[in-house]
Image (cartoon, helix red, strand yellow):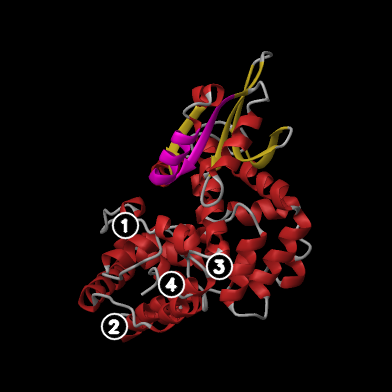
């Protein structure tokens, strides 16, 4: 329903928009009944229903005019409330990084256009992702869904697991696959699920009470009723990334490159390093990501990461060699698919200096490690072991 490798770009878009979603309707109906019964009996669920209304009221107060004037402190509060921020122990560090990478004025303009723009949601989605670094589909969709729950859904790992369990095929696995058109088709599928809620005889009171929270009802259904049903990791899904690198246009390749770059930086953040992306580490060497750690008064150690999606291997090797001119750089890491990595190994075999400090990281391992660390971080942060102000 959502994604497949098709040579022609416009055929792919038509496929995304018009193919009827596959779904196990009987399974869906059974779980809707179970969930609605729990809503009427479980006081905890009733309390959570009221809490989501409060969340909607908070985000709805951010009109376009107010969003265009948001301060750094208000932006922190705005983003810290997002469920997608639970993977970050130090939320202020993350928000400060977003501001540093994008600039507050640009963030104001892009947030206002994303939430309140006149173009289709698909166009606004794609424009936002091209212009703002550091926010993935989970955060972007949550901002939209809390601002306009009657129109937009949250797309995150819980939604992926729920729809995978319900039998929906060809779900987007990687962030770069969630284009504006794909997000629109996911909304259409959740609209069909919402209609099944309306058809259920137990739904009248619940749906009337939560009409304003339409798609947040679906989000909580995914989270409370279905998230534990699927044991499939997103990283276990068949990879189409290499095919997309070979067949994709420059825009697709750029999204793949940026997703890998950002995931490497986030892995470093979770491991306790100071990280940066698109940074100059030596004369003539701007690299995709670095992990940095200071050692008392002795100085610092830097690990350099360069993503090779498509392009010249010689150029990548030259950039990494130049980065080694910085004495703080201890190791340089090339990230690509297994075929490209073998090509890089052959090319540097006779280059003694870089060969000693060069490491190789398969992009599938990057994706798997990121997902596992994300899950661990989210669970640990829910324990609230360290105060935010620490």
Q: Considering the image in quadrants, where does the N terminus appear?
A: bottom left
Question: Which residue is label 2 attached to?
Answer: 200
Mark 2: secondary structure: loop
Mark 4: secondary structure: loop
**Disc nearest the viewer among 4 and 2:** 4
The region drawn magenta spans 330-347
Q: Quadrant of residue 282?
A: top right
Q: Position of residue 24 (x, y in %)?
A: 23, 75
Q: Considering the image in quadrants, where does the C terminus appear?
A: top right
Question: Which residue is label 1 attached to?
Answer: 238
The residue lying toward the viewer, choosing from 130 and 319, is 319
**Image check: 88 left or right of 360?**
right
**Label 3: how many Cα within 10 Å (few below 14, some 14–19, many 20+):** many
Residue 383 shows up from this direction: no
The residue lying toward the viewer, choosing from 165 and 311, is 311
- Gap in Å between the C-alphas at discs 4 and 1? 18 Å
The residue lying toward the viewer, choosing from 252 and 205, is 252
Looking at the image, which residue is at 47% across and 30% down? Answer: 359
Q: Are marks 4 and 2 in contact (CB under 8 Å)?
A: no
Q: Position of residue 387 (x, y in %)?
A: 56, 36
Mark 3: secondary structure: helix
* Residue at far top of view: 298
- Gap in Å between the C-alphas at discs 3 and 4? 36 Å
- Gap in Å between the C-alphas at discs 4 and 2? 41 Å
**Disc nearest the viewer among 3 and 1:** 1
**Label 1: how many Cα within 10 Å (few below 14, some 14–19, many 20+):** few
**Label 4: how many Cα within 10 Å (few below 14, some 14–19, many 20+):** few
- Answer with mark 2 or mark 1, whichever residue precedes in sequence: 2
């Amino acid at each position: 329903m959502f994604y497949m490798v098709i040579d022609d770009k416009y055929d792919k878009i038509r496929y995304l928009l018009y193919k009827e979603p596959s779904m196990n309707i009987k399974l869906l109906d059974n779980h809707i009944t179970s969930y609605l019964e729990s809503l009427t009996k479980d006081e905890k669920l009733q309390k959570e229903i009221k809490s989501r209304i409060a969340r909607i009221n908070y985000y709805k107060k951010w009109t376009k005019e107010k969003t265009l004037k948001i301060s750094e402190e208000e932006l922190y509060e705005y983003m810290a409330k997002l469920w997608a921020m639970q993977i970050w122990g130090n939320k202020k560090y993350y928000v400060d990084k977003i501001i540093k990478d994008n600039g507050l004025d640009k963030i104001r303009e892009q947030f206002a256009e994303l939430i309140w723009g006149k173009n289709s949601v698909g166009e606004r989605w794609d424009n936002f992702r091209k212009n703002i670094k550091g926010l993935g589909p989970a955060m972007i969709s949550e901002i939209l869904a809390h601002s306009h729950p009657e129109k937009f859904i949250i797309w995150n790992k819980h939604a992926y697991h729920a729809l995978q369990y319900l039998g929906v095929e060809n779900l987007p696995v990687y962030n770069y696959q969630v284009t504006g058109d794909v997000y629109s088709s996911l909304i259409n599928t959740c609209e069909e699920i919402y209609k099944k809620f309306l058809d259920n005889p137990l739904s009248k009171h619940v749906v009337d009470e939560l009409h304003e929270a339409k798609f947040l009802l679906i989000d909580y259904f995914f989270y409370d009723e279905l998230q534990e049903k699927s044991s499939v990791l997103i990283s276990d899904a068949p990879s189409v990334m290499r095919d997309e690198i070979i067949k994709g246009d420059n825009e697709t390749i750029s999204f793949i490159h940026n997703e890998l770059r950002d995931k490497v930086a986030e892995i470093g953040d979770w491991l306790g390093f100071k990280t940066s992306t698109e940074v100059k580490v030596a004369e003539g060497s701007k690299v995709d990501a670095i992990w940095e750690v200071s050692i008392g008064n002795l100085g610092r150690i830097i690990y350099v990461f360069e993503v090779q999606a498509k392009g010249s291997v010689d150029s990548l090797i030259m950039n990494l060699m130049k980065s080694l001119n910085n004495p703080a750089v201890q190791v340089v890491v090339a990230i690509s698919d297994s075929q490209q990595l073998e090509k890089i190994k052959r090319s540097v075999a006779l280059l003694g200096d870089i060969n000693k400090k060069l490491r190789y990281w398969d992009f599938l391992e990057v994706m798997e490690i990121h997902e596992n660390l994300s899950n661990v971080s989210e669970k640990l942060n829910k324990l609230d072991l360290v105060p935010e102000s620490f």
